[in-house]
Image (cartoon, rainbow, N blue to C red):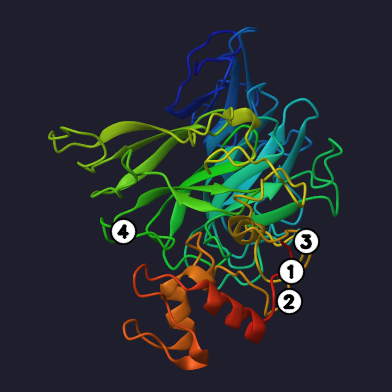
């Protein structure tokens, strides 16, 4: 593939090939100077080979076709070959590139335009470097990792994070319009809290919904492999972050894992791991490759399921964002309880509950707090047994759940739920 349009082989080393889904286009990096005319920058460039037409094109250029003044690498190409994302140390690919760090760019091969994507929602350039980049199927979403602390508000962890640039927030089909692009952080907990340790090597599904990445942080999951990295999957629509490098029964891996590829629609995730407990009889002690089927098995087709990793046939979606209420960490009615929490305890996702409304689900275990002994006693600051005497409320000794009479007392004291 690393040949010129007239089939001359490259006179320098080529690397990091990325092939499009249909196999027609191959993006790669190369230090060769004879793959295209006038390659005189003495730097590693990004090229695209069209296997159907037999042509080779350099894409690490600015919008006026001027060559980059420094090295580029790590290309990712859209399925139709139109968009190529890559990183570069060059300072002349876009105007105003003065940060002195490695940046992420996207080249539109059809329009001949190059844009920088590791910027904040307001367009501010990153105050630190970026390393890896991945582009969605239509080129709208670009996942990348970065040490920058100014791409989103509240980024104070001082570690490498994973971000996604949405190049068309108004969904009008025109990319990179002023005021119609945004940047969001993906390496976050379900409640939006930031990770304490680095997250890196993102890949994004073709539809832009799912982002997989490696992280040394546990994102609130029990972590049997300690400080070793795991593979996580973030749902851009629902806001969930789940651990993907697990055994079939959900057991966490006992060794480090790294992401490899995410399937076209996000259902299948390939990764490699030194773990020995992901499948039976893994005794070779080597780094193996694994394929995870993320479907929830509820009978609703992955492509049609708005919560494809949360079992259940209910497709309700209060805010209409494409993520069903069963998995949406957003709060449509702004009452402090997420749509997911209200879905689990059967309160309305569109009618705001008061602060004293029940049932809430403080510990997010799927049981309302009025029937959850652990949450109840935690709130009251008492232990069971003996039963807490405060407010004359006690769990029923035989089953440990709160009696219906106690529910009535709580209702009288703390208010009624906002919907049946």
In the picture shown, does residue 116 fall above or below 406? Answer: above
Q: CA distance from mark 2 to mark 3?
A: 35 Å
Q: Earlier in the sequence, mark 2 or mark 3?
A: 3
Assess whether mark 4 and mark 1 are in contact (beta carbons under 8 angstroms): no
Label of residue 122 in the image:
3
Label of residue 354 in the image:
2
Q: Earlier in the sequence, mark 1 or mark 2?
A: 2
Residue 293 point in image, percent of width and height? 43, 32
Q: Earlier in the sequence, mark 3 or mark 1?
A: 3
Q: Quadrant of the C terminus?
A: bottom right
Q: Residues within 10 Å of mark 1 (few under 14, many from 20)?
A: some
Q: Please tell me which residue lies in front, 106 or 320.
A: 320
Q: CA distance from mark 3 to mark 1?
A: 39 Å
Q: Which residue is mark 4?
A: 223
Residue mark closest to the camera, 2 vs 3:
2
Question: Residue 52's image quarter?
Answer: top right
Q: Which residue is mark 1?
A: 418
Residue 349 point in image, percent of width and height? 73, 58
Residue mark closest to the camera, 1 vs 4:
1
Name which residue lies at 41% across and 44% down: 244
């Amino acid at each position: 593939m690393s040949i010129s349009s007239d089939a001359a082989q490259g006179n320098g080393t080529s690397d990091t090939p990325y092939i499009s889904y249909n196999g027609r286009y191959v993006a790669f990096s190369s230090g060769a100077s004879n793959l295209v005319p006038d390659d005189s920058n003495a730097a590693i460039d990004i090229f695209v080979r069209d296997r159907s037409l037999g042509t080779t094109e350099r894409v690490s250029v600015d919008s006026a076709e001027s060559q980059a003044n420094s090295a580029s690498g790590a290309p990712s190409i859209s399925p139709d070959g139109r968009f190529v994302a890559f990183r570069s140390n060059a300072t002349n690919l876009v105007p105003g590139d003065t940060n002195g760090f490695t940046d992420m760019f996207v080249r539109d091969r059809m329009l001949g335009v190059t844009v920088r994507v590791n910027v904040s929602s307001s367009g501010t350039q990153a105050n630190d470097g970026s390393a890896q980049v991945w582009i969605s199927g239509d080129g709208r979403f670009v996942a990348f990792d970065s040490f920058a602390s100014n791409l989103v508000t509240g980024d104070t962890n001082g570690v490498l994070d994973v971000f996604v640039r949405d190049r068309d927030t108004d969904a009008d089909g025109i990319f990179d319009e002023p005021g119609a692009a945004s940047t969001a952080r993906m390496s976050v907990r379900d409640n939006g809290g930031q990770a304490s340790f680095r997250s890196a090597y993102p890949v994004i599904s073709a539809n832009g919904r799912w982002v997989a990445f490696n992280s040394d942080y546990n994102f609130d999951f029990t972590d049997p492999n300690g400080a070793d990295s795991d593979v996580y999957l973030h749902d851009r629509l629902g806001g969930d972050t789940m651990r993907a490098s697990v055994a079939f029964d959900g057991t966490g891996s006992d060794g480090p894992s790294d992401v490899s590829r995410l399937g076209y629609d996000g259902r299948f995730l390939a990764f490699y791991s030194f773990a020995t407990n992901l499948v039976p009889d893994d005794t070779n002690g080597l780094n193996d490759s694994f394929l995870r089927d993320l479907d929830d098995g509820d009978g609703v087709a992955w492509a049609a399921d708005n919560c494809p990793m949360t079992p259940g046939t209910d497709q309700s979606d209060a805010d209409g964002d494409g993520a069903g209420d069963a998995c949406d960490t957003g709060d449509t009615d702004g009452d402090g309880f997420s749509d997911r929490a209200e879905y689990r305890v059967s309160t309305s996702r569109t009618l705001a509950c008061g602060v004293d409304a029940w049932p809430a689900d403080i510990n997010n275990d799927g049981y309302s707090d009025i029937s959850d002994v652990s949450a109840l006693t935690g709130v009251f600051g008492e232990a069971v047994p003996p039963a807490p005497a405060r407010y004359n409320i006690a769990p029923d000794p035989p089953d440990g759940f709160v009696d219906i009479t106690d529910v009535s007392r709580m209702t009288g004291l703390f208010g009624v739920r906002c919907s049946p």
